[in-house]
Image: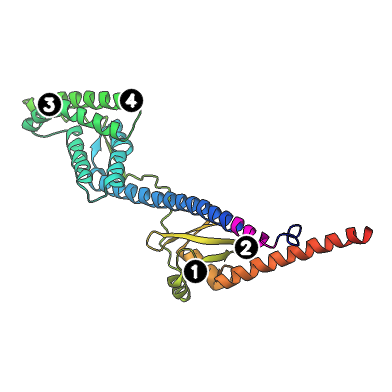
Amino acid sequence: MLEEFPTNPEIFARLLEDLTSFARQEKRRTENVEQRVRETEQGKVKTYDAKRRAQNVINAKAAGLRLHPERSRFVSDVWSKVLVYACIKHGHASEASTIAVEALDQVLWAIQPLNDLADVEKRDRSRVALVTSLRADMEMVNLPEDEIADHAENVLRHLTEISVHDRAYLEASNPQERIQTELEVIPEVVLAAGVDDVDEAPPPAAEALLLRIAERTWFELGPDTPHIRCKLATILNDGKRFIFVNRKGMKVAERNRAELGKELLAGSTTILDDNQIFDKALQAVIGNLREMRQQSIPAVHQR
């Protein structure tokens, strides 16, 4: 601009057009990155919710049952993935989730000792179909083929063996105590969720501040020094988690509701309005220009 202005007054229009085009590209790039961050964090919350629901279902139906240790691990490690997948893909109230829960009931019924010969015969008639269905569900959640084959073989062998034991026990004229040496009580299942759903309440004085906060609000985030200047990209978990991004749209911090409330009250984190952001940016530009001018003065004097 300094070089061309004396001979080309239209330089301002051209530079403004260049600057506007650059700003539009930067904005699109930032929005794309920010959207990916938002979708990733929302996915984490969705996965956490699905795992928590699967954990609750398994514990309600399986915890306390006496099962073979290998079948117990199958329920907690493998079938939980089927429940989680159905919940994430179709929703916890969907027909797919209902079918997955019904399949869990069928698996649990089949893999434990039965007390009626009619039930034993029913299990024998359905065991091949049951294992075939299990294979299909394991393929649906993308388990490795060799792992699927091992699980299917183990379940089929278990169903065969447990039927032999059940028949021997139920058909004996003077039945011995049922063989249960390999059975154990399945403990409460805990699935690694990956997201800490903190329920700690913020200080009462911070509630009004938190309720006024909206997405895309800019902050100077503490308590570290220097503070991080960042934008609130999204609020998750019904207002329990706050995700912050920098001016390039990349995630730089997250806070739970209690943490953010305490920092706002302490003043270590502050909310910036648009005027503050512009004023600070303008001050930075003016400071840079002054520094450049001071550095150029000695060179001029030398000439």
Distance between the alpha carbons at the discs numbered 1 and 3: 60 Å
Distance between the alpha carbons at the discs numbered 4 and 2: 50 Å
Magenta segment: 9-18
- Label 3 neighbourhood size at 10 Å, few (<14), some (14-19), many (20+)? some
Dot 1 amino acid type: Gly
Tell me the residue at 76%/62% (across/down): 6
Quadrant location, the N terminus: bottom right
Tell me the residue at 15%/23% (across/down): 164
Distance between the alpha carbons at the discs numbered 4 and 3: 25 Å
Q: Nearer the viewer, mark 3 or mark 2?
A: 2
Distance between the alpha carbons at the discs numbered 3 and 2: 67 Å
Dot 4 amino acid type: Glu
Up-down: is 269 above or below 145? below
Q: Earlier in the sequence, mark 1 or mark 3?
A: 3
Q: Nearer the viewer, residue 142 or 272?
A: 272
For label 4, the residue is 145
Question: What x and y, as percent, mark residue 23?
Answer: 57, 57
User: What secondary structure is found at the residue carrying circle 4?
Assistant: helix
Q: Residue furthest right?
A: 302
Q: Nearer the viewer, mark 1 or mark 3?
A: 1
For label 1, the residue is 261
Dot 2 amino acid type: His
Q: Earlier in the sequence, mark 3 or mark 2?
A: 3
Quarter location, residue 180: top left
User: What secondary structure is found at the residue carrying circle 1?
Assistant: helix
For label 3, the residue is 124
Q: Which mark is residue 227?
A: 2
